Image: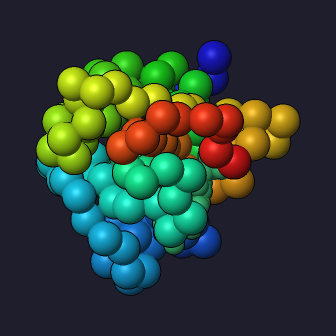
Amino acid sequence: VARYDARVSSDCLFCGIVAGDIPSTKVYETDLTFAFRDIHPSAPIHVLVIPKAHYPDMATLVAADPQLASAVLAASAEVASIEGIADAGYRMVVNTGTDGGQTIFHAHVHVIGGGKVVGLPG
Ligand code: AMP
Ligand code: ZN
């Protein structure tokens, strides 16, 4: 897999959220990751967890920077704890590419729960 050089993409919505140019409801933040509520929740709790650096999808991210991909997964699990759904259970979803239902091409994990999760987002 070709290396991908992360950069801020000026026309990327989620880069705008990381920069604070686009409003979001923050749930959790680390030096490398940012988590905020999905604007169209699929369940009572629906949080998006992203790397602050721009990668177009999780496959590209894990190939280029596996430690950062791991940090996104760890942050996603931490979000579940913060939101109080870790024990009851929840779903992590990674939509990849058009057929996968991906609509925002900045890598992200959906953390979904707070009730029985039915169906898929996207
Ligand atoms: P995906 O379909 O996997 O690319 O997921 C993109 C998600 O981003 C969808 O669930 C959208 O509801 C969500 N979304 C789009 N715009 C915003 C926004 N401004 N703030 C929060 N979530 C958003
Ligand atoms: Zn971006």
Farthest right residue? 99
Q: Is residue 9 visible?
A: no
The residue lying toward the viewer, choosing from 13 and 91, is 91
Quadrant of image for the N terminus: top right
Farthest front residue? 116
Residue under the image location 28 percent in, 27 percent down = 88
Q: How is the image coloured?
A: rainbow
Question: Is 105 on the left or on the right of 21, as rendered?
Answer: right
Residue under the image location 49 percent in, 50 percent down = 43
* In the rendered image, the vertical position of residue 53 relative to residue 19, given as above or below: above
Question: Is 100 on the left or on the right of 74, as rendered?
Answer: right
Location of residue 59 in the rendering, given as x and y in whole percent from the top left corner: 58, 25
Residue under the image location 75 percent in, 34 percent down = 100
Question: Is 115 on the left or on the right of 93, as rendered?
Answer: left
How many numbered discs sit on the rendered protein? 0
Location of residue 40 in the rendering, given as x and y in whole percent from the top left corner: 56, 64
* In the rendered image, the vertical position of residue 54 relative to residue 117, given as above or below: below
Residue under the image location 52 percent in, 35 percent down = 117
Quarter assignment of residue 12: bottom right
Q: Is residue 15 visible?
A: yes
Location of residue 38 in the rendering, given as x and y in whole percent from the top left corner: 47, 60
The residue lying toward the viewer, choosing from 58 and 23, is 23
Location of residue 26 in the rendering, given as x and y in whole percent from the top left corner: 26, 65
